[in-house]
Amino acid sequence: MYPHDDDQEERLLHQERFIHHPQYCGTCGYNLVKLLMVGKCPECGNEYNARPLEMKNIFLPDHMDLPWQDIAAAGLCLLTGILFIGNSLNPYASGGVFIGIVMILIGVPFVLKTVNKLRIVFRLHGIYRRILKEQEESE
Ligand SMILES: [Zn+2]
């Protein structure tokens, strides 16, 4: 064995244990570069894992899109439900209250899902603004 093999091995180990490129805390957006791959955020205490295949509690910008499918499903169900119920108020129309109520009940889980996802998206946008601000300040 050559002596430099040990050095190289140590360097590889060091590379695996520490974060070398900017990665941001998934809760507060703190820049975790130079910290351990698995650890606690020094700012908020969030337990993260930045290993490429695990990625837990790490900010991922590709989750920032609005949940359009859920918004569309929720809107469609509620709108159809309201139209059916509204139509049933017309004395010349034949019912529609039941279908209207069913459509609204189908829509409720989509509304809850949308609200949940929107909360996450807004939090991620807040973190993203912080990251951009800090990048500007460091330039
Ligand atoms: Zn944090």
Image (tube, grey):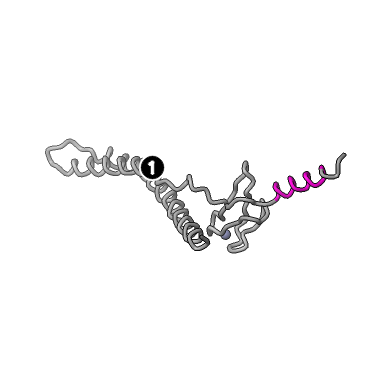
Q: Nearer the viewer, residue 131 or 26?
A: 131
The amino acid pointed to by label 1 is Asp
Give percent across and percent down for residue 103.
31, 40
Give percent across and percent down for residue 78.
30, 44
According to the image, label 1 marks what residue? 70
Give percent across and percent down for residue 19.
64, 51
Q: Nearer the viewer, residue 18 or 63?
A: 18
Q: Quadrant of ligand 1?
A: bottom right
- Bounds of the magenta segment: 5-17
Specify the farthest residue to the left.
92
Quarter of the figure with residue 27: bottom right
Most common secondary structure along the magenta stretch: helix
Question: SS class of the residue under badge 1?
Answer: helix
- 13 inside magenta stretch: yes
Q: Nearer the viewer, residue 136 or 57?
A: 136
Q: Is residue 135 left or right of residue 97?
A: right
Tell me: is circle 1 under 8 Å from ligand 1. no
| Residue visible at 37% across and 47% down in the picture | 111
| Residue visible at 23% across and 40% down in the picture | 84
Q: How many marks?
A: 1
Q: Nearer the viewer, residue 25 or 117?
A: 25
Against 47, residue 114 (above or below) is: above
| Residue visible at 27% across and 43% down in the picture | 79
